[in-house]
Amino acid sequence: MATDTSKYKFNLKFYEHLGMSVIQKLPQPEAKFDLYFLAYDSSNALSHSNHWSDRQGIIELTHNYGTEDDPNYTIANGNSDPGRGFGHVCISVDNIQAACQRISDAGYAFQKKLSDGRMRHIAFALDPDSYWVEIISNNKAEDTENVEETDPSTYRMNHTMLRVKDHTKSLEFYQDILGMSLLRTKESPSSKFNLYFLGYVPGANNNVNTNPLEGVLELTWNYGTENDPDFKYHDGNSDPQGFGHIAITVDDLDAACKRFEEKGVRWKKRLTDGRMKNVAFVLDPDGYWIEVVQNEKLKPRANW
């Protein structure tokens, strides 16, 4: 049966309302899905006009054709069982009260408004699939209470949050294997969890203000999970599906994958597996998928 992909529908309005732009689209009609890469790309953006592989702070959305017409189709947002694992993505904004009001005025729902609970300096909006989008501020919230304007061109795609079972194993993996630096640690013993913020920031000393950055990884460790042999987080790629993966770009894809092999990583897909010879996937200690691709600015490899 013939199919016309130009008739397929996919709503990007929520992320565009947050100020993001589609900087690359990779149609895959033979596999009946498309990939959309969104980022902040105004003249104020940290990676303005860069190739998508030479940026930090990208959201990749995967649209499987026809799901929008299935009234029973839902995704697991990662924040309830049996799909708990991935937590949220996060944007940092200029004036958080005005930014949240602008989102609310557009008719979008919130998981947590600024006025909810004790944490009056963060909010969580819900995208059309109920994924959580944390909103934090680059300015002190108490200094912007009476500011009524917000400029989405100044926003940042700040971080992605994953829950991890064993913080020691995860920190070792992301630092020693993937080469990230520990930027900041937030310990909450009264609530029995810690937050670890990692990223590619040379010379980081675990005391970095991460709010203005892009491409940060937040790991959430709940005390005691590492001692439960039956405890496991959901990777998002088996039912119930939702979150797919994070991704890193590297200077030399072949050399990086050789190093990963020597380090004894677990693979989901080696470069030599399947038809896609420009993409590899390694697994972190919790089984989350990590895509590894070439930074095309440093060494051209793929025509995308």
Image (tube, grey):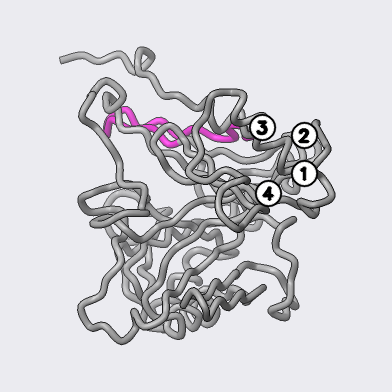
The x, y position of residue 122, in whole percent, is 63, 52
The crowding category of the residue bearing disc 1, from other C-alpha atoms within 10 Å (few below 14, some 14 to 19, many at least 20), is: many
Give the Cα separation between the discs numbered 1 and 3.
13 Å
**Type of residue at label 4?**
Ser
The crowding category of the residue bearing disc 2, from other C-alpha atoms within 10 Å (few below 14, some 14 to 19, many at least 20), is: some
Give the Cα separation between the discs numbered 3 and 2.
9 Å
Disc number for residue 150: 2
The residue at which mark 3 appears reads as 101
Residue 7 vertical position relative to residue 196 in the rendered view, above or below: above
State which region is magenta.
19-35
Image quarter in which the N terminus is found = top left
Give the Cα separation between the discs numbered 3 and 4.
15 Å
Residue closest to the eye, 12 or 267: 12
Disc number for residue 92: 4
Residue closest to the eye, 288 or 196: 196
User: Which is in the foreground here, disc 3 or disc 2?
Assistant: 3
**Type of residue at label 3?**
Gln
User: If you read the primary sequence from the N terminus, does the residue marked by circle 1 or circle 3 appear first?
Assistant: 1
Give the Cα separation between the discs numbered 1 and 4.
7 Å
Give the Cα separation between the discs numbered 1 and 2.
6 Å
User: If you read the primary sequence from the N terminus, does the residue marked by circle 3 or circle 4 appear first?
Assistant: 4
The residue at which mark 1 appears reads as 94
